[in-house]
Image: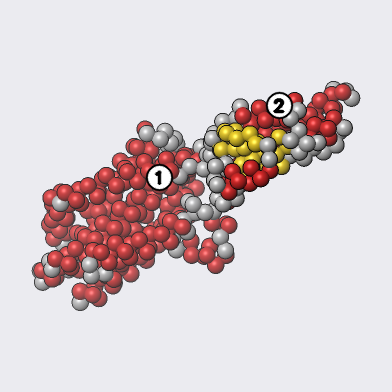
Amino acid sequence: MRLRRIYHILVKEFIQAVRDPRLRFFLFMPPIIQLLMYGYAINFDIQHIRAAVFDEARTPQTRALINRFASNSYFDLDYYVGREDRVRDLIDRGKVTFALHFPWDFAKNLKMGKPAAVQLLIDGTDSNAALIVGRYANSILNDYSIELLKKRLGRQGNMSTPVVVEDQTWFNANRISRYSFVPGVIAMVVMLVSMMLTALSVVREKEIGTMEQLLVTPLRPVEIILGKTIPFVLISLGDVVLVTLVALFWFGVPFRGSPPVLLLGTLLFLISTVGVGLLISTLCSTQQQAMMVSTFFLMPFIMLSGLVFPIPNMPVAVQYLTYINPLSYFIIVIQDVFLKGVGLAILWPQLVALALLGAALLGLSVLRFRRRVA
């Protein structure tokens, strides 16, 4: 293997990338557009929930509790109805996600010291949103219930609540979901760009007939592979820097870790993605086929990465598949570097796993490529 031969292929690939206006656009604009789009779209911090109120009691107690919901930024009390069928109609039509129903005897039961029921009607079409809405509503009702309990106990003497909960959230004190998802989106963008560019670059040579010309030269298959993959590794690293700057200065995501650790993790991750892209190129003959197969690989990688769905909640058989998913390891690395600020002492298991997966995927791809050109 001669470095001079690899250098000439590197120069050729960079010249092709610069000359092709569509490829220039694909190299840098989609990562930024995707980061902005997903950074705003993927957000579990639900606010301004459309709500309705059905108050049969119409007492000062119910009005005080309704005001608590109205003054909270999570709920918009858009409808005040007088019939139960009207509540059902609003939920069926999708005009409200949540309805609050006070029975006629609510205040009466409170005065008598009996449990006073409040009915929460939640649209469960979106199960995740329903869980969050229920948690918000229960939090307001629990606070109100504790205040009433304190007043009742206060009449009997100065008594404090037996348990005081001090809620602390580390690394993301305000629990902003964007801080967790934007680093994961960076990993997704890097995987998409590096995998597709590698696959399309090799397949393009086949499609236009220049691969045969490369094979008849003194170049060895390994030299061809290195010459065609190294440029896209460098371009992907540039994309990482670009989208990281967008994450820091546009979204305000904190970066508490070490840039060299992030760079090392990205390089090991790119070995895997480039290996997958090269493997795709050995399975396809046209760029259209390469795009379709890339999508086939990309979706399972994302779904089994732990970014969208927690891995412990998956069936055991599916959890074993996550062990061979490089994206699941890199998401841990990038989130921990951004938010926790940990280093090699903590992240070495993920980095070792990325190195082993990268070596296996790249080795398999090179072997298949050499057999195809032999």
> Mark 2 and 1 residues: CB-CB less than 8 Å, in contact?
no
Q: Which mark sits nearer the N-terminus, 2 or 1? A: 1
* Direction from residue 116 to residue 84 in the image, left or right: left
| Label number found at residue 268 | none
Percent across and percent down for residue 121 are: 66, 44
- The answer to whether 80 is drawn above or below residue 349 in the figure is above
Secondary structure beneath dot 2 equals helix
Q: Residue at x 23, y 63 (%)?
A: 287
Q: Amino acid at mark 2?
A: Ala
Percent across and percent down for residue 131 are: 61, 46
Q: Which residue is mark 2?
A: 64
Q: Nearer the viewer, residue 64 or 43?
A: 64
Q: Residue at x 13, y 68 (%)?
A: 209
Secondary structure beneath dot 1 equals helix
Q: Which quadrant, please, contains the C terminus?
A: bottom left
Outermost residue on the right side: it is 156
Q: Amino acid at mark 1?
A: Tyr
- Counting labels gives 2
User: Do we see residue 90 in this rendering?
Assistant: yes
Q: Nearer the viewer, residue 101 or 171?
A: 101
Percent across and percent down for residue 90 are: 59, 43
Percent across and percent down for residue 151 are: 81, 25
* Direction from residue 157 to residue 249 in the image, left or right: left
- The answer to whether 75 is drawn above or below residue 27 in the figure is above
Q: Nearer the viewer, residue 106 or 195?
A: 106
> Marks 2 and 1, Cα distance to the nearest angstrom?
39 Å
Q: Residue at x 19, y 59 (%)?
A: 227
User: Do we see residue 257 in this rendering?
Assistant: no
* Direction from residue 315 to residue 82 in the image, left or right: right
Q: Which residue is mark 1?
A: 38
10 Å crowding of disc 2: few (<14), some (14-19), many (20+): few
Q: Residue at x 87, y 23 (%)?
A: 155
